[in-house]
Image (tube, grey):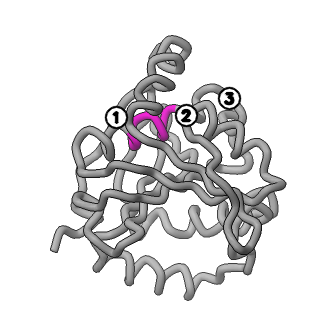
Amino acid sequence: MTNVHSAKMFTGFGIELTPLTLNDIEQVRQWRNHPDITKYMVDQSYINTEQQQQWFHLLSNRDDQQYLMISYKQQHIGVIYGKSLTSEPLLIAETIELGLYLDPESKYRNSILAFSPSLVFIHYLFHCCQCRKLLAHVLPHNQSAIRYNTQLGYEITGTDESGMVIMELNQANFDQAKMKLAKILRF
């Protein structure tokens, strides 16, 4: 089994993506529990320290998920992750759900730099893995996430039984969106 924590670092568009470590999880937990982040999560419950440690321990034995710390100028600014929807290892999964959140206090949260981690990780999933489709489930009131995903090439394909907006991204749409965004992201 390939351990998600043994993955290499990814870089591009001015950012670095590195596997989440035990030293990172308290900062990630604080970001995740911040009201500006939690209000857009499917599970809006408070995560305590013990729950975060248990989650990280379980994650370290899984190859169907990957959580990466986003850094800019050697400062942690967020987390991006991918999950196989079929429990297959991420490297061979054809359908992956992607998620991202940035430090709610970061000045980069609503900047063009916020696209960098997605561009780097999605490129890896489509070009180095066997991914054919990315999915995103977005709360209907999270219009900024819907706009963000649309700019990455995602298309709205419907809603699920709970009212979540379902968005899908294929490689052709991503490559086209990436060309446009890359012109703006000059790092």
Per the image, the residue denoted by label 2 is: 152
SS for callout 3: loop
Q: Position of residue 29 (x, y in %)?
A: 61, 69
Measured in 3D between alpha carbons, the distance from the residue under mark 2 to the one under mark 1, in whole angstroms, is 18 Å
Check if residue 39 falls in the magenta segment. Answer: no
Q: Amino acid at mark 3?
A: Ser
Per the image, the residue denoted by label 3 is: 111
Residue drawn at (22%, 60%), measured in percent from left and top?
92
Q: Nearer the viewer, mark 2 or mark 1?
A: 2
Q: Earlier in the sequence, mark 2 or mark 3?
A: 3
Measured in 3D between alpha carbons, the distance from the residue under mark 3 to the one under mark 1, in whole angstroms, is 18 Å
Residue drawn at (54%, 34%), measured in percent from left and top?
153
Instruction: Name the magenta segment's main secondary structure.
Output: helix
Q: Earlier in the sequence, mark 2 or mark 1?
A: 1
- Residue stretch rendered in magenta on the structure: 116-122
SS for callout 1: strand
Disc assigned to residue 11:
1
Instruction: Determine whether 152 is above or below 131 in the image.
Output: above
Q: On the rendered image, what quadrant is the C terminus found in?
A: top left
SS for callout 2: loop
Q: Position of residue 76 (x, y in %)?
A: 52, 47
Asked if the residue under mark 1 is in contact with the one under mark 2, i.e. CB atoms within 8 Å, the reply is no
Q: Earlier in the sequence, mark 3 or mark 1?
A: 1
Q: Amino acid at mark 1?
A: Thr
Say left or right for 76 vs 112.
left
